[in-house]
Image: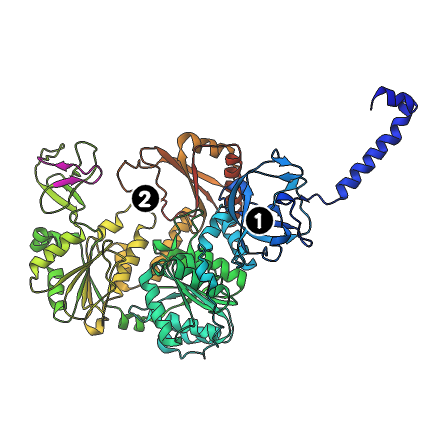
Amino acid sequence: MSSENGRGNGGAEGAVPEQLALIREAVRQNKAPKAKPRTWRGAALAKELPVARVLVDKGVLHLDRYFDYAVPEELDAVAQPGVRVRVRFGAGGRNVRQGRREGGSLIDGYLVERVAESDYSGPLAALAQVVSPEPVLGPELLGLARAVADRYAGSLADVLQLAVPPRYALAEARETAGTPPPPGPPEPGTWVRYGRGAGFLRALAAGGAPRAVWTALPGPEWAEEIGRAVQATLASGRGALVVVPAGRPAARVDAALRRLLGEGQHALLTAGAGPERRYREWLAVRRGAVRAVVGTRAAMFAPVRDLGLVVVWDDGDAGHSDDHAPFPHVREVLELRATRDRCAFLLGGWSCTVEAAQLVESGWAAPLVADREQVRAAAPLIRTVGDTDLARDEAARAARLPSLAWQVVRDGLRQGPVLVQVPRRGYVPRLACARCREPARCRHCAGPLEAQDAGALRCGWCGREESGWHCPECGGFRLRAQIVGARRTAEELGRAFPAVPVRTSGREQILDTVPAAPALVVSTPGAEPVAEGGYAAALLLDGWAMLGRPDLRAGEDALRRWIGAAALVRGQGAGGTVVIVAEPTLRPVQALVRWDPVGHAVRELAERAELGFPPVSRMAAVSGTAEALAGFLADVRLPSDAEVLGPVPLPVTDAGRPRQVGAPPPGERWERALVRVPPGSGAALATALKSAQAARLARGGSETVRIRIDPPDIG
């Protein structure tokens, strides 16, 4: 107030009423709606619920919230919750002209809800475009995505990138058929082999929500057994979701459901179907045209209506862990869905993971297993060849395969195909000095030398050929194979059995099935084809290569891969035999001989409980450069019961070498720290890590710090 006004109003005495009037006006303004929505070019505003809350498609933690936009009247009808939109983002409060916010770049997003007012006090930019009137983000999917983002310390936008497939206009334009009538309840079939199998199906058909950890018997019946569980759920008028680790098992469950239910009762969601077809199938599920879904990893978010059953097969497979932020695991996501939707849960596999054993031990799920008589009737005979046997075996020293293996192959080929599992692909992936066993390395980059063919040596990192190699330790000139690859094994077996066809299945070419005729099938773990009528025999070579990995899960993974191969062999009553080349006293080998994956998982769980390792505890891996990691750990406010292990240096990724998921960029030296908390503090740990990362990014932190909750590989 100026001095002239003061004198004209009686000096200081007149200022009090004026100040009170200003305060009253400020109160009235605060009570008024804060939102000041403006539309582009003066367009009219929607008359009802003119504010849209939008989730922008930016997976940055400090932007993991909703942003308010004005709804133009021309978009009022199509701007409904769940649709895809495009908005201007990044204009800032400075770019406001005549009450309108302008500028910024166009970015995709999802319209979450419409409200009457905004909590934001400034002018709102308008929705630029409604990409499609198809509502793809329902409240159930939104709630699940938010729960997954919070559990894995990630952003909601990143989860939705995994959950909602890209749009294809032609798929949206196609009309969807009506929901088919539910089928009748199934017969128990081979579920009678399990003590509670028939009762599990009856509970599903009656609308119940049982939870079970199912240890499947060896053989091909598992796909039809899953199909019968799905049929029982559909018979109750509810939906079902089945997630498998790869396209081949998905095709087997798909075929089983077609036999049991006929066409049009379920959708297949796999990457092999192509993006347009996959989006079309996904839309049919969202619209309620089908209520059963079979798919691979991304299908864990499928918007099945009235969900009554979730199934995950072989949860120990690496294909169930997503390689994109925030790295969710299928098993954990389906556990969340079973809890949120109060539906049935079935975790199945030939083997048993430690996490599955914990679900049973905690009482969250019940065991679904067969008795020992059924196991002995279905499983093949397991025979072992250890180091002592190899030392006494002249054939093993000369040709790498022990005499017992040769004999089993000869006998098996009289009855049908024989499977040979080799841990590595290629010819001779690793070489060492024959005298002192020192690994053979390149003179230029110290990379491992490999025999790409029967002739020259080549570096596995820089690709240079090596001639005239000699051992720097002992001076020796002879090399031996540390691990012989699948192609070299196929070559050796082809020479030993010249009249028998040899087929290989691996990364370059994976076979789905092989005929029942005699043949040698050499495969890497996970790529074993199914033989018609089952394999007559199987060889599991170089077992020490899988057991010797420096990882907490080495024994569990080795047993799972061995059982996965042995389950394709005929039962012992039909002459099926499996020979494993590994030390017979080791616990995973003994579990294979007894065909007792549950017992192995229970013992592993007890040991991890004593040591405080997952899944008994929750753990997060934080990695980055030494400076960035130290700064992050100094800023984060961890729970009081958290324990930091490390940091330790990570292996440097050399240029030109294939980069593994989560590995540092080529040439950069990173470190990793493990943060461990006891049960009950997992949510607090995820919140603390997410808040620290968001604050760091908001300050403009340039160096990358990667966070992964429950890492599958902790060394």
Q: Residue type at mark 1?
A: Val
Quadrant including the C terminus: top left
Q: Is residue 459 magenta?
A: yes
Q: Where is residue 592 in the image (x, y as percent from the top left)?
A: 27, 61
Task: Give the residue displayed 40% in from the left and 51% down from the top.
Answer: 322
Q: Give the range drawn in magenta.
A: 457-468
Q: Which mark is residue 54?
A: 1
Residue of label 2: 660
Answer whether residue 85 is visible to the viewer in this image.
Answer: yes
- Is 671 placed left or right of 345 in the picture? left
Q: Is residue 629 magenta?
A: no
Q: How crowded is mark 1: few (under 14 residues within 10 Å), some or many (20 or more)?
A: many
Numbered disc 1: secondary structure: strand
Q: Residue type at mark 2?
A: Gln
User: Which residue occupies the foreground of this view, 436 or 200?
Assistant: 200
Q: Position of residue 602 (x, y in %)?
A: 38, 58
Task: Give the residue displayed 90% in from the left and 20% down from the top.
Answer: 7
